[in-house]
Amino acid sequence: MTFPVETEANIRRRILDICREQTRNVVDITRELALMTDTVSEGKAKEAKEHYQNMLKILGDFEGTKKKLLEEVASFGTLLSNREDFIRLIFKIGEVADYAQGIGFRLSAVIDRNWKVDKKYTKRLAELNTLVLEEMSKIRETVMSLGFNPAKAMELSRGVEETEKKVDTAYRSLDLEVLDDKIPLRTLLLVRDLSAHMENMADLGVDVVDLIRVIALTA
């Protein structure tokens, strides 16, 4: 008995299905992070920690899916002509999740150590995080389109870049504000560190859509 050889189109479809799951996880991680930032700003420590735990759970699912995705890509070898592009995409999405985890860890430390940060700054951080969430949602939409309409994916990718520019503008404004204000050194370092991590997430989002464009061109 002979078995049909899996076509490259079927392989791409399977891998894209898992990529969609990964980007959904990233959106969920970023959403929990945004909710955590909001509740920290509102002084709701218990709720903030709950969102952090939710985020850690999704991160666990994310790592499991990442491993599955890498195994899928590796198993097909030369059957997938642009597997290196998919591998780069997998790791780049992983970097976004890593930055989100770093932000959550720092916010959790703020709660545990009862550090006082002016609400003006935590509110600005929450607004910045909301923009990052918007960008991640657009990345997911782009990946969702990649399998059935590569041209639509290319079009949606421009929306990701536009949102990243908004993040960049908000980040620079906040950075200059904290440098200009006379605030405790710890607050200065913390706000700059958190906002830089958020801005890095947004920058990585653009790297992700650049890779999506490459994959779309070979569809």
Image (spheres, rainbow, N blue to C red):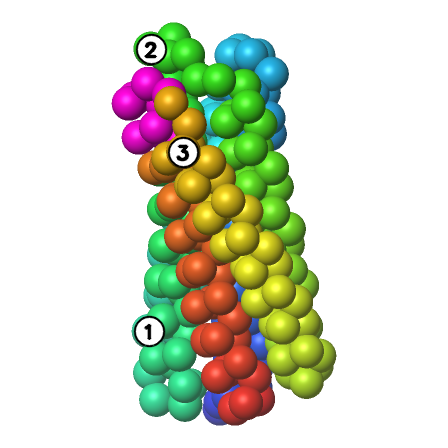
The label nearer to you, 1 versus 3, is 3
Q: Which residue is at a point 52% across and 25% down the rendered structure image?
A: 122
Q: Residues within 10 Å of mark 3 (few under 14, many from 20)?
A: few
- Please give the label number shown on residue 113: 2
Kind of element beneath mark 1: helix
Q: Which residue is at a point 40% across and 52% down the rendered structure image?
A: 200
> Quick check: 7 above or below 196?
below
For marks 1 and 3, the one nearer the N-term is 1
Image location of residue 161, percent across then percent down? 57, 67
Q: Which residue is mark 3?
A: 180
- For residue 50, say whether it is visible: no
Amino acid identity at mark 1: Ala
Amino acid identity at mark 2: Arg
Image location of residue 27, percent across then percent down? 58, 48
In the picture, residue 66 is in which quadrant? bottom left
For marks 2 and 1, the one nearer the N-term is 1
Look at the image and give the residue range highlighted in magenta: 183-191
Q: Which residue is at a point 48% across and 39% down the rendered structure image?
A: 174
Q: Which residue is mark 1?
A: 74
Q: How many marks?
A: 3
